[in-house]
């Protein structure tokens, strides 16, 4: 195979791996599901990962978390066995993934439907901007940024 074809193949494989990684992350964050082990979440992130809310309201709500274990503990803190959510479903749309060798950048619009332990329900939309890195042949999340665009209370 010529070099250009190999590079195109690597780019397509990187895009596919990033897409599967995001699907796994969202699956682990959906509720109801079996209890998610924090170690399962941790395996999706680089050792030096950053997870942060951006924009004034989102930054205040979520803050910034650095390091694989801190990120996994933060995200896992919202999931069973925590009673935070009764229902939490994620839908990704408007995907854009750019692979450049062993790094990639992705952007999605995420819609999330949540019902909380107190019975309230809401729908919100968020812009996700995420950097990825391929480490020893495995694509991982390096920098996860979330910015809430809107939220609406849902009535029963």
Image (tube, rainbow, N blue to C red):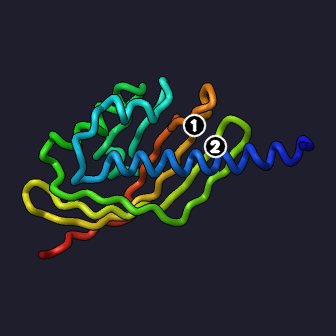
Which sits in the foreground, 8 or 57?
Answer: 8
Which part of the image, by quadrant, shows the N terminus?
top right
Whether residue 65 is situated above or below residue 35 in the rendered picture: above
Give x and y (percent) for residue 48. 49, 25
* Label 1 sits on residue: 139
- Asked where in the image residue 151 lies, by quadrant, the reply is bottom left
Which sits in the foreground, 85 or 33?
Answer: 33
Name the secondary structure under disc 1: strand
Residue located at (24% from left, 50% from top): 33
Q: Residue furthest right?
A: 2
- Mark 1 or mark 2: whose residue is earlier in sequence: 2
Give x and y (percent) for residue 94. 54, 65
- Numbered mark located on residue 104 in the image: 2
Whether residue 151 is situated above or below residue 45 in the rendered picture: below
Residue located at (50% from left, 29% from top): 46
Q: Are marks 1 and 2 in contact (CB under 8 Å)?
A: yes
Whether residue 128 is situated above or below residue 45 in the rendered picture: below
Give x and y (percent) for residue 105. 61, 46
């Amino acid at each position: 195979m010529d070099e250009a074809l190999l590079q195109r193949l690597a780019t397509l494989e990187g895009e596919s791996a990033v897409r599967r990684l995001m699907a796994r992350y969202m699956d682990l964050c959906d509720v109801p599901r079996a209890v998610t082990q924090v170690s399962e979440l941790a395996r999706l992130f680089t050792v030096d990962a950053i997870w942060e809310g951006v924009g004034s309201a989102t930054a205040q709500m979520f803050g910034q978390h650095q390091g694989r274990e801190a990120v996994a503990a933060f995200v896992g803190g919202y999931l069973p066995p925590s009673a935070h959510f009764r229902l939490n479903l994620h839908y990704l749309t408007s995907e854009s993934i750019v692979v450049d060798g062993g790094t990639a950048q992705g952007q999605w619009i995420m819609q999330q439907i949540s019902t909380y332990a107190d019975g309230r329900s809401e729908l919100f939309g968020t812009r996700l901007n995420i950097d990825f890195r391929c480490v020893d042949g495995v694509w991982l999340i390096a920098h996860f940024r979330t910015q809430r665009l809107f939220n609406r209370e849902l009535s029963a």
